[in-house]
Image (cartoon, helix red, strand yellow):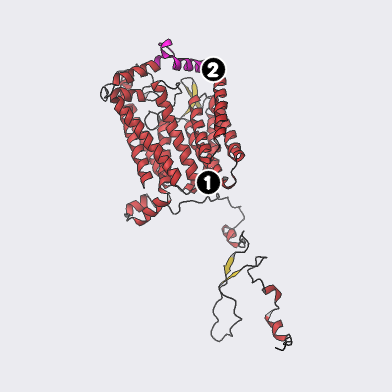
C-alpha cells in the first residue's frame, strides 16, 4: 500500500498548505473590497469539501466504468467548450471567455477537458495495445488534441493548451512513442507558438517581459517584478505566516497565479523547498503506480495524469521565479480556484483507486483484518484488471425483458475447446441407458460437442442388427 499512502500523504499536505495560504493571501484584498476577510478562505474550504466528496466517489468507482464512459464524456467536453464561446453562456473575465456562471461559482470547462482527454486517450491506447503502431498512437490522439486546442484558442486560453499538451506528451510517452517523434513534435510546437505570438500582440509582450521584466516595470513586467520582490523579502525563513506585504493589493492575483511568491515571502526558501518536495513525492507515487500496475489503462492514465500535474506545477513555479513566460496556469492543490481544486481532488481520488488496484495491494488488503466500517467504505477491488463491459442498450418496447435469456448460447470463439458432459442418474425401475462418455472430451471440428469418431459410427440400433464381419484367423 506504499503508493496509496504516498498519494494520500502528499496530496493531503499540499491541500492543507493551500487552504492556509489562500486564507492568508486573500484576506487583505477582501477587506479592502469591504468584505469579511474570511470569505475567500471559507469559499475555498467549501470547494475543497466538494472536491473531497468527488475524491471518495473516484476511489469507489470501478475502473471499467471509467473506461466505459470516457468516449461519451469527451463528447460532452466538446459541447461545453463550444457553449462557453456563446455570449450569454460564457462569462468573459480578464479578456477571456473561459467560464460558465453556475450561480455559486464559475465553472471552467477547460479543466475538465484535460482530465477527460487523459482518460479517453489512455482508454484508446489500452484498447489498441496488442497491435499498437506509431500510426495507431497518433491518429486518434492528435486530431482530438487539435480540435480541443482550437476551441481553447478561441477563448483564448494559452495556458490550458500547454497543459493539454502535457497530457498528450504523457500519453505518448507511456505508450512508448520513439523519441525522434517527440523532437518533431517539439519543433512543430515551437512553430505554432511563433504563429500564435505573431497573431496577438499581448503574447509578444509577455515574451519580452519574461526576457527583461525591468524594461517595462510599470506594465508588462509589473507582476513579475513584484513576484521577485516577494521572494527576495522572504529569504531563508520568511517574514512569518500572514505578514506578507505584497498581498496588500501590490501583487496582482496573489491568491491564484502568484501564490507561490506569497509562500516564498511568508515561509521563505524552506517553505518553497517543502512544497517542491511534496510535488516530487506525488510524482514518484504516480510513476510507481504505473510501474507496478497490471492494467494497461491504469499505466497510461497514471503517467498522463502525473506528467500533467507535475508539469503544470513546474510551469507555475517557473514563471514566478522568472525562468518561464507567464502562462496563467494555477498551482495544483494550492492556488485559489473552484474548478481547478475540485477536479484536482478528483484526480487524486483516481490515483488512489489506481494504487489500490495494484496486484500486491489487493493481496495485502485481502490478508489484513479489516473492520466492518472499512469494508463498507473502502471495499477491496475484485481484480487487478477490471474488464470493460459495454453500456446497456435500451430494450425495444415490444420485447420482453427476459428475451436475452432465450437466446441460444454462443459458441466459443476458440476451436478445440473442452466441455463436460453431465448425465442424470437412472430412476429406480428404469433400464440403464447407454453410458455417455463422461469427463472432458475434445470438441470436433464442427463444434457440436461430439467425439471426433462419433460421426463415422452407426447409431446403436443399427450396430446391433448389422451382421458381424468375419474374424480373421490368427
Q: Closest to the observer: 30 or 379?
A: 379
Residue drawn at point x = 37 percent, y = 50 percent: 378
Q: Which residues are magenta?
A: 199-223
Q: Residue furthest bottom?
A: 473
Classify the position of the C terminus by image quarter.
bottom right
Residue 86 visible somewhere in the drawing: no
Which callout, 2 or 1, points to the residue nearer the camera?
A: 2
What separation in Å lies between label 2 and label 1 (alpha carbons)? 40 Å
Q: Where residue 275 sits: x, y (%)? A: 34, 31
Q: Where residue 333 sits: x, y (%)? A: 38, 33
Residue drawn at point x = 33 percent, y = 55 percent: 368
> Secondary structure under badge 1?
helix
In the rendered view, does 63 fall on the left or right side of 459? left
Q: Residue furthest front?
A: 474
Q: Where residue 264 sits: x, y (%)? A: 32, 24
Residue tagged 1: 68
Q: Which mark is residue 200?
A: 2
Question: Is disc 2 surrounded by few (<14), some (14 to 19) or many (20+) residues within 10 Å?
Answer: few
> Height in image: 452 above or below 265?
below
> Height in image: 78 above or below 373?
above
Magenta region, mostly helix, strand or loop? helix
> Height in image: 457 above or below 469?
above
Instruction: Answer with the quarter of the image where residue 38 lies.
Output: top left
Q: Closest to the observer: 57 or 42?
A: 57
Amino acid at each position: 500500500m506504499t503508493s496509496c499512502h504516498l498519494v494520500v500523504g502528499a496530496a493531503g499536505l499540499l491541500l492543507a498548505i493551500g487552504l492556509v495560504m489562500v486564507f492568508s493571501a486573500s484576506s487583505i484584498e477582501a477587506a479592502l473590497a469591504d468584505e469579511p476577510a474570511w470569505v475567500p478562505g471559507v469559499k475555498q474550504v467549501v470547494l475543497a469539501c466538494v472536491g473531497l466528496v468527488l475524491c471518495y466517489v473516484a476511489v469507489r468507482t470501478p475502473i471499467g466504468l471509467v473506461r466505459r464512459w470516457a468516449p461519451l464524456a469527451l463528447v460532452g467536453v466538446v459541447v461545453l467548450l463550444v457553449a462557453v464561446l456563446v455570449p450569454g453562456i460564457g462569462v468573459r473575465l480578464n479578456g477571456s471567455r473561459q467560464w460558465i456562471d453556475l450561480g455559486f461559482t464559475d465553472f471552467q470547462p477547460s479543466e475538465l477537458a484535460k482530465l477527460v482527454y487523459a482518460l479517453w486517450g489512455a482508454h484508446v491506447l489500452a484498447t489498441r495495445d496488442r497491435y499498437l503502431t506509431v500510426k495507431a498512437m497518433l491518429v486518434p490522439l492528435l486530431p482530438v488534441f487539435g480540435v480541443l486546442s482550437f476551441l481553447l484558442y478561441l477563448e483564448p486560453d494559452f495556458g490550458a493548451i500547454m497543459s493539454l499538451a502535457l497530457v498528450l506528451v504523457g500519453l505518448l510517452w507511456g505508450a512508448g512513442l520513439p523519441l525522434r517523434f517527440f523532437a518533431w513534435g517539439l519543433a512543430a510546437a515551437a512553430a505554432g507558438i511563433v504563429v500564435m505570438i505573431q497573431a496577438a500582440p499581448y503574447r509578444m509582450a509577455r515574451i519580452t517581459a519574461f526576457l527583461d521584466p525591468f524594461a517595462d516595470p510599470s506594465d508588462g513586467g509589473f507582476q513579475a517584478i513584484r513576484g521577485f520582490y516577494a521572494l527576495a523579502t522572504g529569504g531563508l525563513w520568511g517574514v512569518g505566516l500572514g505578514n506578507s506585504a505584497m498581498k496588500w493589493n501590490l501583487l496582482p492575483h496573489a491568491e491564484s497565479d502568484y501564490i507561490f511568491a506569497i509562500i516564498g515571502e511568508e515561509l521563505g526558501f524552506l517553505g518553497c523547498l517543502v512544497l517542491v518536495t511534496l510535488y516530487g513525492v506525488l510524482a514518484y507515487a504516480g510513476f510507481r503506480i504505473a510501474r507496478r500496475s497490471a492494467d494497461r489503462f491504469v499505466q497510461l492514465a497514471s503517467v498522463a495524469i502525473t506528467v500533467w500535474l507535475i508539469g503544470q506545477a513546474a510551469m507555475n513555479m517557473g514563471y514566478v521565479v522568472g525562468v518561464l513566460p507567464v502562462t496563467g496556469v494555477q498551482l495544483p492543490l494550492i492556488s485559489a480556484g473552484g474548478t481547478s481544486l475540485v477536479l484536482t481532488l478528483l484526480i487524486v481520488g483516481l490515483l488512489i483507486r489506481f494504487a489500490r488496484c495494484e496486484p500486491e495491494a489487493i493481496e495485502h488488503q485481502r490478508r489484513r483484518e479489516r473492520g466492518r466500517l472499512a469494508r463498507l467504505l473502502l471495499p477491496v477491488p475484485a481484480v487487478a484488471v477490471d474488464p470493460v463491459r459495454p453500456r446497456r442498450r435500451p430494450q425495444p418496447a415490444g420485447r420482453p425483458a427476459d428475451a436475452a435469456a432465450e437466446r441460444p448460447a454462443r459458441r466459443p470463439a476458440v476451436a478445440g475447446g473442452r466441455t463436460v458432459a453431465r448425465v442424470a442418474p437412472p430412476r429406480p425401475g428404469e433400464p440403464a441407458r447407454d453410458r455417455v462418455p463422461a469427463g472432458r472430451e475434445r470438441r470436433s471440428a464442427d463444434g457440436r460437442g461430439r467425439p471426433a469418431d462419433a460421426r463415422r459410427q452407426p447409431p446403436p440400433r443399427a450396430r446391433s442388427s448389422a451382421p458381424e464381419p468375419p474374424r480373421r484367423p490368427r
